[in-house]
Image: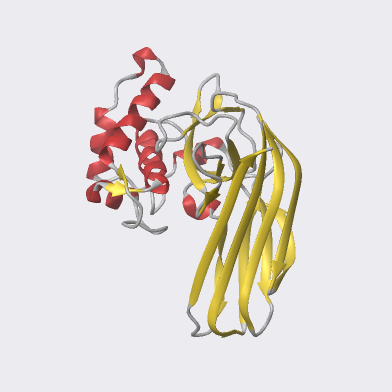
């Protein structure tokens, strides 16, 4: 399936910003199951200082704000051809070793709630994939999908205790429990073509687990499916912070507001 993507982020600052530096992970790469046919990034109110591949094989662009800027607009447009591989990405790539993805992070650190999930998961007698889908179902039951209650700093334990969250919380809780069960697991972020609308106000998140003889396999906990040809992978990492579409810092006392517009549609 060929997907057309438009992603615009408009930052407004209450006072001129003297200095700011951002990391952008908004450019998908051609990899197993997807071929990038064309991609363009435009920056207004800043410029690209450097580009590089990080430890997770994500493409990163380092953007500086124009001194004195009161607005920053980041626009990505492109086309990606995606193949339905039932969520199977395959062999591990990137500079980070596979064992690293068993490591806990502040957002995925297991506490009593995650340990309870892991204990409730079935054994692997019916295979790893069946076991992981069952775990995904347990996470979905424990965290009701409900926007507005969590943010990018919410931990898996906190989302489980609250009982509601969004796709990021589903992914973090699932990753945490999967690591307790002995699997390397990672966070994946990107785009999803919705069946009922073109316009969206955020990207999408899911999880990937490394399974013997298959390699990395994706699990979209929120939608109870392994990613198919409607999904475009952009970045992966130990958690959201390593795969965030935008991260960085700025100097000054100005506060900011952000408007995001995303369109994903079949060509």
Residue 142 horizontal side relative to residue 242, left or right: left
Q: Quadrant for residue 191, please give it.
A: top right
Residue nearer the viewer, 128 or 55 = 128
Determine whether 3 is above or below 152 in the image. above
* Residue at screen point 57% across, 60% down: 246
The image quadrant where one finds the C terminus is top right
Of all residues, the one furthest to the front in this rendering is 196
| Residue 228 position within the rendered picture, expressed as x and y whole percent measured from the top left | 56, 29
Q: Quadrant for residue 117, please give it.
A: top left
| Residue 217 position within the rendered picture, expressed as x and y whole percent measured from the top left | 52, 28
Of all residues, the one furthest to the right in this rendering is 38
Determine whether 242 is above or below 228 in the image. below
Does any portion of residue 177 appear in the rendered image? yes
* Residue at screen point 34% across, 56% down: 150
Q: How many marks?
A: 0
| Residue 195 position within the rendered picture, expressed as x and y whole percent measured from the top left | 51, 36
Determine whether 138 is above or below 57 in the image. above
Residue 211 horizontal side relative to residue 167, left or right: right
Of all residues, the one furthest to the top in this rendering is 126
Residue nearer the viewer, 84 or 48 = 84
Residue nearer the viewer, 261 or 22 = 261
Residue 57 horizontal side relative to residue 132, left or right: right
């Amino acid at each position: 399936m060929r997907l057309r993507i438009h992603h615009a982020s408009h930052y407004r600052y209450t006072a001129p910003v003297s200095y700011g530096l951002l990391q952008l992970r908004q450019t998908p790469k051609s990899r197993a199951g997807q071929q990038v046919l064309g991609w363009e990034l435009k920056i207004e109110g800043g410029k690209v200082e450097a580009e590089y591949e990080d430890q997770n094989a994500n493409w990163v662009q380092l953007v500086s704000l124009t001194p004195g800027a009161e607005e920053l607009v980041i626009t990505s447009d492109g086309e990606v051809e995606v193949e339905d591989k039932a969520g199977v990405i395959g062999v591990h790539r990137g500079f980070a070793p596979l064992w690293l993805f068993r490591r806990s992070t502040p957002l995925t650190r297991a506490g009593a709630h995650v340990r309870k999930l892991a204990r409730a998961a079935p054994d692997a007698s019916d295979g790893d994939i069946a076991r992981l889908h069952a775990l995904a179902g347990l996470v979905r039951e424990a965290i009701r999908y409900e926007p507005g209650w969590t943010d990018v700093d919410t931990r898996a334990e906190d989302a489980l205790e609250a009982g509601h969250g969004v796709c990021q919380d589903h992914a973090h809780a699932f990753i945490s429990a999967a690591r307790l069960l002995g699997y390397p697991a990672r966070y994946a972020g990107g785009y999803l073509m919705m069946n009922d609308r073109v316009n969206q106000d955020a990207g999408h998140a899911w999880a990937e687990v490394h399974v013997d003889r298959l390699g990395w396999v994706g699990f979209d906990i929120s939608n109870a499916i392994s990613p198919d040809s409607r999904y475009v992978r952009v970045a992966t990492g130990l958690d959201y912070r390593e795969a965030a579409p935008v991260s960085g810092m700025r100097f000054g006392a100005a506060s900011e507001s952000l408007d995001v517009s995303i369109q994903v549609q079949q060509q």
